[in-house]
Image: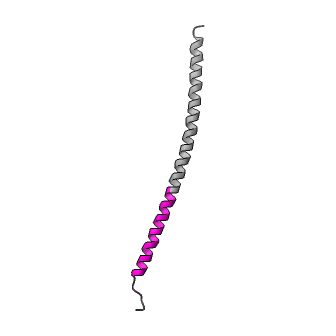
């Protein structure tokens, strides 16, 4: 039975590989969730910035416009 140690080592290697893959998958899921949160937050802030700049452009345009009564 000289092949028994090789089979045991191979089984331990496969088991270790499965454990490492499970941990890596868990970490990657957390990273993906965090990256999605950051992207959503960044898009929200960029949208607010665009809206504010558009409001400022409208306000400046209204101030530059000459009054119709005068």
Residue at left offset 56%, top offset 19%:
10
Coloration of the structure image: one colour
Asked if the magenta segment contains residue 45, the reply would be yes
Magenta stretch encompasses residue 41: no
Measured from the top left, where is residue 1 in percent x and y?
60, 7
Count the numbered circles shown.
0
Whether residue 25 sits left or right of residue 57 in the image: it is right
Q: Residue furthest top?
A: 1
Residue at horizontal 47 percent and vertical 68 percent from the top: 52
The picture places residue 23, in percent across and down from the top left corner, at 58, 34
Read off the magenta span.
Answer: 42-70
Q: Position of residue 60 (x, y in %)?
A: 41, 76
Question: Would you say 46 lies left or right of 25 here?
Answer: left
In the image, residue 4 above or below residue 60: above
Q: Main secondary structure of the magenta part?
A: helix
Looking at the rendering, which quadrant does residue 16 occupy?
top right
Picture quadrant where residue 11 is located: top right
Position of residue 13 measured from the top left corner of the image (x, y, whole percent): 56, 22
Residue, x 42% and y 81% (percent of image)?
63
Q: Quadrant of the C terminus?
A: bottom left
Q: Name the residue at the bottom extreme.
A: 70
Q: Is residue 32 above or below residue 3?
A: below
On screen, 54 above or below 29? below
Relative to 63, say whether 21 is above or below: above
Residue appearing at x 54%, y 40% in the figure:
28
Left or right: where does residue 4 sit relative to residue 39? right
């Amino acid at each position: 039975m000289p092949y028994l140690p090789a089979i045991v080592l191979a089984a331990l290697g496969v088991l270790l590989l499965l454990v490492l893959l499970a941990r890596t998958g868990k970490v990657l899921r957390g990273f993906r969730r965090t990256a999605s949160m950051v992207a959503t937050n960044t898009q929200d802030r960029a949208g607010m910035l665009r809206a504010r700049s558009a409001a400022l452009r409208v306000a400046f345009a209204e101030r530059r416009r000459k009054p119709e009564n005068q």
